Image (cartoon, rainbow, N blue to C red):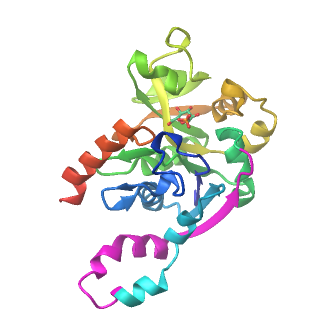
């Protein structure tokens, strides 16, 4: 049903300089796997096998990562090192990978709009790979796809955050529909704590219906003079319905050094060594 997932990966990764000077931040390894591969695996596990990247300059390593390296395969085939290639081989065989460029950095809304040709006229997932999500059984996107089947409208993943963190996020207000599901009534991008409509912050997982593209086209630049997906979703909520879903799982903010280290420790102890 939902087959496609968009990954906006054009960002500079300034907070990780100098590491990200010539390497995409999405390729930074959390233990032994690049950050973006965790997101792609989550999408594949949710049944979203057509992966689209909205890239920018200096991001070619991502395309090389999701392609066969014949040299490496030739070197490693039949040796005891083959096990190290298992996860990426599985990803490459399950998914198809397409790329388009965002020529100017004009915000997340604009990045999504740049991916329109890769998506067409169908509902799709969005993963912001800076947010690494770990769930006990079912991945966060898979949980959201299940919800989409029931409600057929755009869905944003949310979690409660402390007041001093709220201005880093898009924040929603909503009417509870049932346990952990809200119909969105308000949405504000990175509000001051005093203006935040609640403590429910959007994290980087979305299911979007394709009417979002036209809405984004008609959305003027907002916070930080960027075209905000949050503003477009607010319009969608006013015109119809957007849901917010309190997902089951843990999210690590790998866009910050502290969050990245936390994720690394968690993955090392709970996933890599298991
Ligand atoms: C983006 C969104 C924001 C959301 C956040 C989640 O912001 O604009 O609404 O809460 O991702 O990580 P960014 O962190 O890219 O500035």
State the residue at coordinates (65%, 35%).
229
Q: Looking at the picture, tell me which residue is in the foreground, 57 or 38.
A: 57
Q: Which image quarter has ligand 1?
A: top right
Q: Position of residue 174 (x, y in %)?
A: 53, 21
Q: Is residue 29 above or below residue 256?
A: below
Question: Residue 250 lies in magenta, yes or no?
Answer: no
Q: Give the quarter of the figure containing the N terminus.
A: bottom right
Is residue 172 visible in the rendered structure shown here? yes
State the residue at coordinates (48%, 73%).
92
Is residue 251 visible in the rendered structure shown here? no
Q: In the rendered structure, which segment of residues is drawn in magenta? A: 76-104
Q: Position of residue 268 (x, y in %)?
A: 23, 53
Q: Is residue 235 above or below residue 35?
A: above
Residue extending furthest front?
A: 18
Q: Give the quarter of the figure containing the C terminus.
A: bottom left
Q: Is residue 223 above or below residue 252?
A: above
State the residue at coordinates (76%, 37%).
215
State the residue at coordinates (47%, 76%).
93
Q: Position of residue 270 (x, y in %)?
A: 21, 51
- Quadrant of residue 247 in the image? top left
């Amino acid at each position: 049903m939902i087959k496609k997932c968009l990954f906006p990966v054009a960002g500079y990764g300034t907070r990780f300089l100098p590491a990200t000077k010539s390497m995409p931040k999405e390729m930074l390894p959390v233990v032994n796997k690049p950050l973006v591969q965790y997101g792609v695996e989550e999408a594949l596990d949710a049944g979203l096998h057509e992966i689209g990247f909205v890239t920018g300059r200096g991001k070619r390593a991502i395309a090389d990562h999701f392609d066969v390296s014949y040299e490496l395969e030739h070197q490693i085939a039949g040796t005891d090192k083959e096990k190290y290639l298992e996860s990426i081989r599985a990803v490459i065989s399950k998914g198809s990978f397409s790329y388009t460029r965002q020529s100017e950095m004009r915000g997340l809304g604009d990045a999504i709009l740049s991916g329109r040709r890769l998506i067409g006229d169908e509902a799709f997932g969005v993963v912001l790979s800076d947010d690494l999500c770990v769930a006990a059984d079912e991945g966060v996107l898979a949980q959201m796809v299940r919800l989409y089947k029931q409600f057929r409208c755009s869905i944003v993943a949310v979690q409660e955050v402390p007041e001093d963190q709220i201005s880093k996020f898009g924040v929603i207000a909503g009417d509870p529909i049932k346990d952990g599901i809200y119909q969105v009534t308000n949405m504000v991008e990175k509000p001051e704590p005093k203006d935040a409509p609640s403590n429910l912050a959007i994290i980087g997982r979305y299911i979007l219906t394709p009417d979002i593209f036209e809405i984004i086209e008609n959305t003027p630049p907002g916070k930080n003079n960027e075209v905000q997906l949050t503003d477009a979703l607010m319009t969608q909520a006013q015109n119809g319905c957007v849901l917010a879903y309190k997902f089951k799982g843990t999210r690590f903010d790998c866009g910050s050094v502290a969050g990245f280290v936390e994720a690394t420790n968690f993955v090392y102890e709970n996933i890599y060594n298991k």
